Image (tube, rainbow, N blue to C red):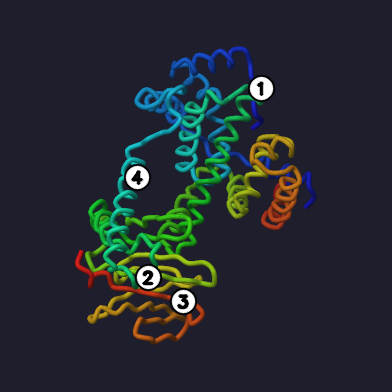
């Protein structure tokens, strides 16, 4: 296939048709939003309720982290890790009851993984910190949830003693020292249910 | 779809929008929504995400209208906002994919598989575009679908012309491989 042929194919690709109703409603939705919120002169920043909530939550995280750090209770978890904050986890759980599948944090920020339905059973939050070479990330999830580690699907489990087990078809790790694969990864886990929340 | 040229009427609409008239801005939205929604669709492959990103692009453009100096065409300026929002969206989605979670990835693929294409070729092309790295896809969207020169695309994506040329070259190679069986079907 030469360049003009490729270009011809690309250009002949059409888009799904946008329903007329959508085309008509789209500008109205924008106008409605502008009338509610913005003017070009004053709105250098769009301070949405979600953003406000996020800022409030971030402030809580910082305060909780500072208090925790000061009282020396978080020494087993990396000091920069917001997921170690039980306040943060409790508030996030309260925001999304039975929908929170995981809170994930890496060097770029925090993300919530939510279920579409309120079908996530209540159980102790489990903290997992993984370093694969220079790339580290942390997450808080719950027993029975599936995550991906080094490209492999792994189920996070908590046993009756509160130990955390990561188990997959070709992967097994537990915090009592049993490692059948994934030896190159640096993994730290903690059953946060053991911490009074 | 090529970027449309500005006009006196467009300048007036921008001025009225700047003085706080949302209805004037609505006229600009009507004029450019097809173009912006096409850009965001090519970038995301999902009608829902495309619509949401197009809406964000128009809202952001309105808020930043004061910074539009008329140095470029309004359509090019809008296009830049839309494409950069799409790249940010892609980064967020990639981050979710990376961070050891399968759920977000499933959501993306469910959205991406949304049909509605008028024919098989269109669906195949979008599928192939979806498989390009986001920056290469942006380079193709701007140069092929928006008819921007490599210099214009470089300004839009805040990179050098050489980078754009490389991205377009690399994207073409991948697209040729992905779409090679369409040559005969089409001719």
Alpha carbon distance from label 4 to label 1: 41 Å
Circle count: 4
Residue B126, compared with residue A80, is above or below; it is above
For label 1, the residue is B5
Residue at 36% x, 69% y is: A77
In the rendered structure, find residue A128 and report the number of the disc placed on it: 2
Asked if residue B122 is positioned above or below residue A102 in the image, the reply reads above
Q: Mark 4 vs mark 2: which is more N-terminal?
A: 4
The lab-note entry on whether marks 3 and 2 share a chain reads yes
Q: Please name the residue that numbered disc 4 is placed on.
A: A55
Chain under disc 3 = A
How far apart are the alpha carbons under marks 3 and 4?
Answer: 32 Å
Q: Is residue A180 left or right of residue A3?
A: left
Nearer to me, B49 or A93: A93
Residue underneath mark 3: A186
The answer to whether mark 4 and mark 1 are in CB contact below 8 A is no
Q: Residues within 10 Å of mark 1 (few under 14, many from 20)?
A: few
Kindly report the distance in space between the C-alpha atoms of the residues bearing marks 4 and 2.
25 Å
Q: Position of residue B126 (x, y in %)?
A: 59, 48
| Nearest the eye: A156 or A133 | A133
- Closer to the eye: label 4 or 1: 4
Identified at 65% across, 25% down, the residue is: B73
């Amino acid at each position: 296939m030469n360049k003009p042929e490729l270009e011809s194919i690309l250009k002949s690709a059409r888009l799904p048709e946008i329903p007329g109703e959508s085309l008509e409603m789209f500008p109205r939705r924008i106008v409605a939003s502008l009338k509610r919120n913005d003017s070009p002169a004053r709105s250098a920043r769009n301070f949405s309720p979600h953003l406000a909530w996020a800022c409030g939550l971030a402030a809580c995280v910082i305060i909780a982290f500072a208090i925790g750090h000061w009282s020396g209770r978080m020494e087993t978890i990396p000091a920069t890790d917001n997921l170690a904050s039980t306040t943060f986890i409790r508030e996030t759980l309260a925001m999304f009851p039975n929908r929170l599948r995981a809170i994930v944090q890496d060097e770029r920020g925090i993300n919530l993984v939510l279920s579409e339905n309120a079908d996530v059973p209540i159980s102790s939050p489990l903290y997992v910190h993984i370093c694969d070479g220079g790339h580290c990330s942390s997450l808080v999830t719950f027993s029975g949830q599936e995550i991906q580690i080094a490209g492999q699907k792994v189920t996070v489990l908590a046993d009756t003693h509160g130990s955390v087990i990561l188990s997959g078809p070709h992967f097994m790790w537990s915090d009592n020292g049993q490692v059948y694969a994934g030896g190159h990864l640096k993994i730290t886990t903690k059953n946060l249910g053991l911490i009074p929340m | 779809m090529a970027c449309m040229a500005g006009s006196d009427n467009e300048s007036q609409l921008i001025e009225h929008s700047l003085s706080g008239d949302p209805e004037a801005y609505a006229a600009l939205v009507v004029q450019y929504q097809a173009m912006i929604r096409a850009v965001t669709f090519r970038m995301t492959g999902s009608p829902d995400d495309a619509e949401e990103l197009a809406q964000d692009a128009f809202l952001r453009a309105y808020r930043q209208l004061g910074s539009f100096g008329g140095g470029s065409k309004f359509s090019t300026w809008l296009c830049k906002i839309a494409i950069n929002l799409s790249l940010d969206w892609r980064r967020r989605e990639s981050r979710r994919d990376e961070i050891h979670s399968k759920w977000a990835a499933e959501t993306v693929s469910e959205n991406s598989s949304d049909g509605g294409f008028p024919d098989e070729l269109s669906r195949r092309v979008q599928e192939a575009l979806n498989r390009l790295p986001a920056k290469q896809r942006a380079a193709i969207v701007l140069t092929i679908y928006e008819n921007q020169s490599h210099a214009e695309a470089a300004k839009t994506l805040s990179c050098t012309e050489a980078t754009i040329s490389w991205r377009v070259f690399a994207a073409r190679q991948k697209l040729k491989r992905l779409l090679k069986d369409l040559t005969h079907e089409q001719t």
